[in-house]
Image (cartoon, coloured by chain):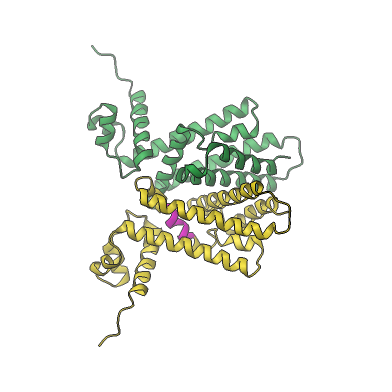
Chain colours: A yellow, B green
């Protein structure tokens, strides 16, 4: 008898393959058949794990977001400098570029879809909370008002979102060293 | 005899109606039939002005970008403060929110389309040049290096892009007064 199928692992594997295809071609550019073919499964198996592209897209979107937040929290717990922590949110390598390509492709579809919109809002609010955790460590013991903290966190969040977006569309204009320099210039104004 | 048709005016009118529909429902949510119906024309007339949705989308995308740049340059020429100039790039009212909804919907389709991608890059580079004009006035007569100028312009550009993006997806979290406060906090670190 073959070993029992680990469905959760297979679901993740299908999603990972789909993520690579989606990042390259966008949501319309990819069919369940393409994904099945790339994964070496039948279309029926892919449909077993994800009812439709919307469900698949949301799963991939969420996984990428949760993974990025976990990475920053890990660096934070390890006492890494603010710049190092936050760099995990930027498209500085292939994997993180793919995450951002997926987020931006997802954005193109939320206008029409209240559930996808709610998912986007949850992830953005989580990202803001994450940035606040980074700043809370930075400002520990300093006299920084709640209001200033809120403004700074929002400045940094929007800057990261914009930096990543500009980079995904024009990587030549935004090589890693330039992304890092722009972030460092911002962080210098936020640190006390 | 009826007066001759002003084709350029009609093209603009069709695009303006399409922009409203696209901002609300995204590119997939709208058909040429919907646009024709809203404009009071036949689908054939709409197709006469725009060969396909891609061409229509690019036209709307470009018009909104050119309009926003012109508005900032106008404020700049009138000697308005930096904050006032730059606020024209934020989704602070219905019209500018619609512009951003259109840009973001457009982004969802550029991954797959080299021409749309090139258009996005041109507009982003123009936006960077615009921010540089704003900063050049701010830094006039001051000893600011080219490199610092470049970093500051990129910080401000990315911050605007991110602020607008976050606002479009979660307007409750980003009311106009909060957008203005976050921008002012950033500008305070950029001004000399």
Is residue B103 rendered magenta in the image? no
Q: Residue furthest bottom?
A: A1
Whether the magenta-drawn stretch holds residue A102 is answered as yes
Above/below status of B16 relative to B163: above
Asked which quadrant contains residue B190, the reply is top right
Count every numbered label the image shows and give the total: 0
Above or below, comparing residue A94 to residue A163 in the picture: below
Observer-nearest of B172 and B137: B172
Quarter location, residue B143: top right
Residue A94 visible in the shown view: no
Tell me where the magenta segment starts and ends, as one range: A97-105
- Give the quarter of the figure containing the C terminus of chain B: top right
Of all residues, the one furthest to the top in this rendering is B1
The spot of residue A149 in percent (x, y) is 64, 50
Q: B76 left or right of A108?
A: right
Q: Nearer the viewer, residue B69 or B21?
A: B21
Q: Quadrant of residue B50?
A: top left
Q: Residue B68's x, y, as percent? A: 51, 33
Residue at 38% over, 45% down: A111
- Percent position (x, y) of residue A76? 62, 65
Q: Residue at x 55, y 58 (%)?
A: A90
* Residue B25 in view: yes
* Majority SS type along the magenta span: helix
Q: Taking B64 as reference, is A185 above or below it?
A: below
Give the image location of residue B46, x and y in percent.
27, 32
Q: Residue at x 27, y 85 (%)?
A: A2
Q: In which quadrant of the rendered image does the N terminus of chain B lie? A: top left
**Viewer-nearest residue: B2 or A135:** A135
């Amino acid at each position: 008898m073959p070993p029992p199928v680990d469905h959760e692992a297979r679901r993740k594997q299908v999603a990972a393959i789909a993520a690579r295809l989606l990042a390259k071609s966008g949501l319309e550019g990819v069919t369940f058949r393409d994904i099945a073919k790339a994964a070496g499964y039948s279309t029926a198996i892919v449909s077993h794990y994800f009812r439709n592209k919307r469900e698949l897209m949301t799963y991939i979107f969420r996984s990428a977001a949760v993974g990025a937040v976990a990475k920053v929290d890990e660096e934070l717990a390890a006492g890494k400098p603010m710049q190092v922590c936050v760099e995990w949110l930027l498209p500085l390598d292939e994997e993180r570029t793919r995450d951002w390509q997926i987020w931006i492709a997802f954005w193109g579809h939320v206008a029409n879809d209240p559930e996808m919109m709610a998912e986007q809002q949850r992830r953005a609010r989580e990202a803001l909370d994450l940035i606040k955790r980074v700043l809370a460590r930075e400002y520990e013991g300093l006299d920084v008002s709640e209001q200033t903290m809120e403004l700074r966190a929002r400045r940094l969040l929007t800057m990261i979102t914009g930096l990543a977006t500009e980079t995904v569309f024009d990587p030549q204009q935004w090589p890693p060293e330039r992304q890092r320099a722009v972030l460092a210039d911002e962080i210098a104004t936020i640190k006390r």
